[in-house]
Image (cartoon, grey):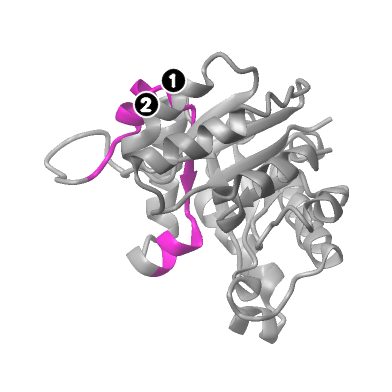
Amino acid sequence: MRQQIAAANWKMNLDYKQAKTLLDTILAQQIMLEAHRKVVFAVPFPYLRMARKKTKEMVNYEVSAQNCYQKKSGAFTGEVSVEMIHSSGARYVIIGHSERREYFHESDQVLAEKINLALEHRLTPIFCCGEALSIRESGKQDAYVAEQLANSLFHLTPDAMQKIVIAYEPIWAIGTGKTATAAQAQEMHAGLRSVLARQFGQPVADLIPILYGGSVKGSNAKELFSQPDVDGGLVGGASLIAEDFTAIIHALK
């Protein structure tokens, strides 16, 4: 079975004490994970080392950065390199989140550079893609998301591509009052997998986890994750609530 992943994206939330308390509360549940299941905590940069220390004795619990810079090192005040992230003990990094694309104007080319550096430094990229409401309403979502994949990932070899995790974000269903159904999630995920299969071959596409990032909650995770091409979730707000995120972990296939 493909890896099934519950990834918590804390975004810019929680002070240090709150972060420790949340991690302690979730980890105290001692949820044992089978080999194909993983929990990933994408925490703010200052908490990477603390989060890794708390999870290092737990099997299949990992830590992720929420972003990285597209250069190895240099005079880039305030930025964080992939080498710094790896040296903290984190093994994942989110690349191309919709908020990074929208607020910080990260281009597909910049994201491709980040992907290359992450792989070079043995970090697993969680590559985000997805369409806004205007794209969805125009019916162009399939072509739009396929272009995001092509521009940032299609330079990779099939072997390198197997090291990527995809996260699909239906931006149109986040904070808009509109709801994406489990069937809509499955339709997009199946479409993404077919795009990957055309470029890298079906065996490679079948190995790549595709996470759903559209307001996953404890109450809807089981239905979403039951879909054949939905391999877990990239979870925002619900990952800040221990009870909700625990339910999401239990919902993994």
The label number, if any, that marks residue 199 in the structure image: none
The answer to whether the residue labelled 2 contacts the one labelled 1, judged by CB atoms less than 8 Å apart, is yes
**Above or below: residue 146 compared with residue 39:** below
> What percent of the width, then of the height, locates residue 154?
57, 47
Mark 1, Cα crowd under 10 Å, few <14 / some 14-19 / many 20+, is few
Q: Is residue 83 magenta?
A: yes
**Is 223 or 75 nearer to us in this picture?**
223
Q: Is residue 40 left or right of residue 250?
A: left
> What percent of the width, then of the height, locates residue 170?
65, 67
- Quarter the C terminus occupies: top right
Residue most extreme to the left: 75
Q: Is residue 214 left or right of residue 93?
A: right
Q: Say which amino acid is labelled 2.
A: Arg
The range drawn in magenta is 79-102
Q: According to the image, label 1 marks what residue? A: 53
Q: Across the whole image, how many numbered discs are drawn on residues?
A: 2
Q: Is residue 179 magenta?
A: no
The structure residue drawn at horizontal position 40% and vertical position 49%, both measured from the top left corner, is 14
